[in-house]
Amino acid sequence: MMTDVGDVGTHTPPTLTQRQAWLRAFAAAIRDNEPALCHLVRREIGKPAWETLVADVLPLLASIRWHERALPGLLRRRRLGGRSLWQLGQRHWTERVPVGRVLLIATWNYPLQLLGIQLVQAIAAGNRVVVKPSERCPETHTSLLALASAALVRAGLPKDLIGVRPATRDEGARLLREEQFDHVVFTGSTSVGRAIAEIAARTLTPTTLELSGHDSAIVLDDADPRLAARTIWNATIMNAGQTCMAPRRVLVQEGIYQRFVRELAPLVGGAAPVRLVDEAAAMRCAAMAEAAMKAGGRALNGVLEGVLSDTSAEAAEECPRRCLRPIAIVDCPVDTELFAGDHFGPALAVTPVESLEEAIDLQRSAQSLATSVFTRAPARIVSRAA
């Protein structure tokens, strides 16, 4: 078993001033190394540099700034008002203290943003951290953690507040079985999250699990079809569809269905190939779309290209076999795998519904994380969705 110096035993939590100094030093290191970080992300998972900057680096820097400003208020001791008769003469306060030793099992789809923010929150709260980097982007995570550790030293803190473990698929399970933690954080697939929860439950270790959804976008007949189509398609192709809150299906009320499809068609037809994390993910999306077509759906751009082959002109260096042209299948039957939404890529099922109630029922049968509704009268949604 690997044990970092400082992983066991008692640590005095850093002072508030030290934590804020670390946040400033970490932010400065990210800004100074942004091009190198973006290059690593592109090399390991294929995300374009501009998208890494917009979706990873800038949100992470914004989070660091917010935590630096908000930390004194968040950690301030607070007097509790109100008391029962039997508490006469008592005074009570609430105070936030570190939980202790936190395990971060890092994910790959937003490798800088997600791991970075989780690291910021854990260290800013005064905890010690152990990180298991993702096996899909080990160099990116190792580089980010090196910057965070160097920032600890510049802030006058011990470098071993952050421990790093091997970036292997089996290491997370080993850590949970063989080492003791006070909290476990994981963002990723439902299947892995369920396995983590089962292991952690044996020792009653608290967990924070943010898992993927199979979510819908609901477009009602009073919505702006152009706005809805552009917004939904942008969410579908962002990060090559590899976002936990990305829509997997669109449920469109029949009165606006044809207009929505007409607005969506040129967006789908003009979409460039995107690079997924691996060939298996791209092939899964293509296979599910093809099965939906065989069941009665149709490809909105008229043809289903599927995974690009290594020999195609577009596939060369920028688009290997893990590249896929984003897909939208309209009139998608509800009993298909594509409609069920258990995939992680830019493949969208579009299905007409009679009413909001039907759309809500279909979404409730799925694994929900973030459902969006397009309407000009949002007040009517709250009562019906409750």
Image: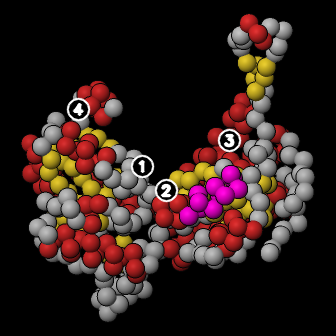
User: Does label 4 or label 1 sit earlier along the sequence?
Assistant: 1
Image spot of residue 49 (x, y percent): 50, 67
State which mark lies toward you, 4 or 2.
2
Residue type for callout 4: Arg
Using the image, determine if residue 63 lies above or below residue 73: below
The residue beneath circle 1 is 369
Which picture quadrant has residue 298? Answer: bottom left
Q: Secondary structure at mark 3?
A: helix
Q: Secondary structure at mark 1?
A: loop
State which mark lies toward you, 3 or 1.
1
- Residue 202 covered by magenta stretch: yes
> Residue placed at 56% from the left, 64% from the top?
195
The residue beneath circle 3 is 67
State which mark lies toward you, 4 or 1.
1
Image spot of residue 124 (x, y percent): 74, 46
- Residue 267 covered by magenta stretch: no
User: Does label 3 or label 1 sit earlier along the sequence?
Assistant: 3
Which picture quadrant has residue 373? Answer: top left
User: Does label 4 or label 2 sit earlier along the sequence?
Assistant: 2
> Residue placed at 42% from the left, 49% from the top?
369
Mark 4 residue crowding within 10 angstroms, few (<14) / some (14–19) / many (20+)? few
The residue beneath circle 2 is 211
Disc 3 from disc 1: Cα separation: 25 Å
Mark number for residue 376?
4
Write down the region rendered in magenta.
Answer: 195-205
Disc 3 from disc 4: Cα separation: 35 Å
Image spot of residue 85 (x, y percent): 74, 6
Mark 4 in CB contact with mark 2 (< 8 angstroms): no
